[in-house]
Amino acid sequence: MKAMREAYGEALVELGAANSSVVVLDADVASSTRSILFRNAYPDRFFNIGIAEANMAGIAAGMAASGKVPFINTFAFLLALRAADPVRSLVAYNKLRVILAGAYGGFSDSYDGASHQAVEDVAIMRSLPNMTIVVPADEHQVRKAVFAAAEFDGPVYLRLSRAEVPEVYKADNDFIIGKGAVLRTGRDATIIANGYMVTKALSAAAELAQQGIEAEVIDMHTVKPIDRSLILASAARTGAVVTVEEHTIYGGLGSAVAEVLSGSNPTALEILGIKDVFGESGSYEGLLAKYGMDQPAIIEAVRRVIAKKI
Amino acid sequence: MTMDASRTQQLKQLANQMRIDIIEMLHNVKTGHPGGSLSAVEILISLYYQHMKVDCNNPCCGDRDRFIASKGHCAPVVYVTLANKGFFDKAELKKLRQLGCMLQGHPDMKQIPGIDMSTGSLGMGLSVGVGMALSAKMDKQDYYTYVLLGDGELQEGQVWEAAMAASKYGLDHLIAIVDCNGVQLDGRVDEIMPVGDVGKKFAAFGWHVAECDGHDITAIDAALDGLKELQDVPCVLVARTVKGKGVSFMEGKNIWHGKAIEEADYKIAMQELGGACQ
């Protein structure tokens, strides 16, 4: 088990060896995002742009238009907010291959408090045409996502975490952008999660099984484009869906799943996430519990949604 | 590139014809930005007819010089220039800003041959220029990246973030040109939000600065020649211009930043420029 940010930095170095077009930019937080590992390995292809996130995104657009494959790094909230206009008008509009690596997603920078926690980034990115959004669940998926994003046709928002989280996958797992993964099958309800919430969902499903409830668990690592057919097939089998994301309940994974279900097969649904409030300082697990994204909260939501089955 | 008297005369005539084409195009569709296009005519001519290495038959050629209209609302003058240079058919100019057309309200690299970066939202073009110039430097290519900025646009903080970065990386193949027409949408730049001494500001950010009359093609040409001699430093040409240049009632008037040209104004403008009304 290793911190996802460490896995990210190591994957960048590995990618840098395989692809000489890869360049890495950071906005004075390379030690935090771990892009510093790439700087140490390939100083000629690393650019510290200073505390100027919008400029970093604009420079990356110019580099991508010149044949480079830029990875830009800073805290997730800064990429989604400070750099929003160049990300929209230059990167997304022109469908440039720029990988936006949003570090410290969700509550993972827990002690720094609300100013540094990213609870709205996925919603903002999801509203941009041409943008693809990937939220990896563990260190192995981070590595796979880094390599897949570098080959992807168009920009990818890679929402990363500061946290050290248990391994969900084996190192050689299959990973395809846009294709969710069924990690556990079940007939009573479907739990759709991403990021660290996949681990929480699996632990909730294990506990529910003890209580005689079989929950299916889907890792929806790609929030956009969302894997419609996987959602619909599972919802048709179980008739009850719970989504869990480390993000506001507005505009993220839960909304994306609701859009799919309401348009094609209205299904009982519970959306778990941050309920339209800002976070606060505290321990990571403490925050997840307080704001309703831990194992007991998921178990309760599954029981509620089963009771709501149409 | 050296200019003799006949070349100068030829380009002056081209400038007048381009002003006629801009007025014609904007009157035709009754939408678009005349003021900041007319102020940049000589700058575009100097770039595309004297300096830039571009090929209309191979608009994406890897070693071409790049041009970014950071003040993207000057799309009309850019489109007229590109059409004149053969990047696309002049008939496209008649469809400016219309549904399904190639010529969007602001430059669009995905649709328009010869546009190196889509622009429109102000203050971001210099960052893009830094990215292109950095890429050229990494790849040991010697193409130039030219970025055209407005003086009102300098109110955007990102311009100065980019200015710092260009200086840090010593981007001597990045040349910014500021179309200092002194007028922005809501009024005069020195009233709305003074940008102060533009040259001194860039100098303080580590740039080499040249200034000239932005309507004197010979002066622009000589200034750019001089800037290209310099090494390890980004360069800016502060071009003193007049917004709406060439059409008396538009000159220096902020209302002509983005006003539609109606029939009566069109006739006066064409008369002044010596063009025939279509």
Image: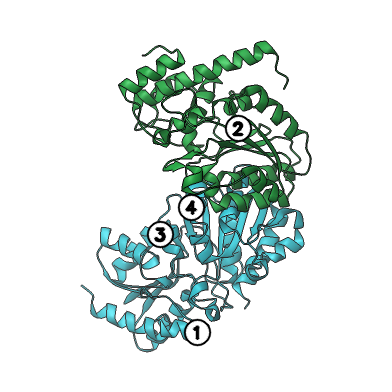
Chain colours: A cyan, B green
Query: Residue at 65% of width from left, 46% of height from top?
Result: B130
Q: CA distance from mark 4 to mark 3?
A: 28 Å
Left or right? Give the position of B178 relative to A182: right
Task: Please report contact status of discs 4 and 3: CB closer than 8 Å, yes or no.
Answer: no
Asked if badge 4 and badge 1 are on a common chain, one would say yes
Residue A94 percent across, percent down from the top left = 50, 44
Q: CA distance from mark 4 to mark 1?
A: 33 Å
Density class for disc 4 (Cα within 10 Å; few <14, some 14-19, many ≥20) is some
Which residue corresponds to mark 1? A285
Q: Please say whether residue B55 is visible from this viewpoint.
A: no
In this rendering, which labeled residue sits more in front, label 4 or label 3?
Answer: 4
Task: Please report contact status of discs 2 and 3: CB closer than 8 Å, yes or no.
Answer: no
Which residue corresponds to mark 4? A85
Residue B36 percent across, percent down from the top left = 48, 33
Nearest to N terminus: mark 4 or mark 1:
4
Residue B123 percent across, percent down from the top left = 53, 47
Left or right? Give the position of B84 relative to A218: right
Which residue corresponds to mark 2? B60
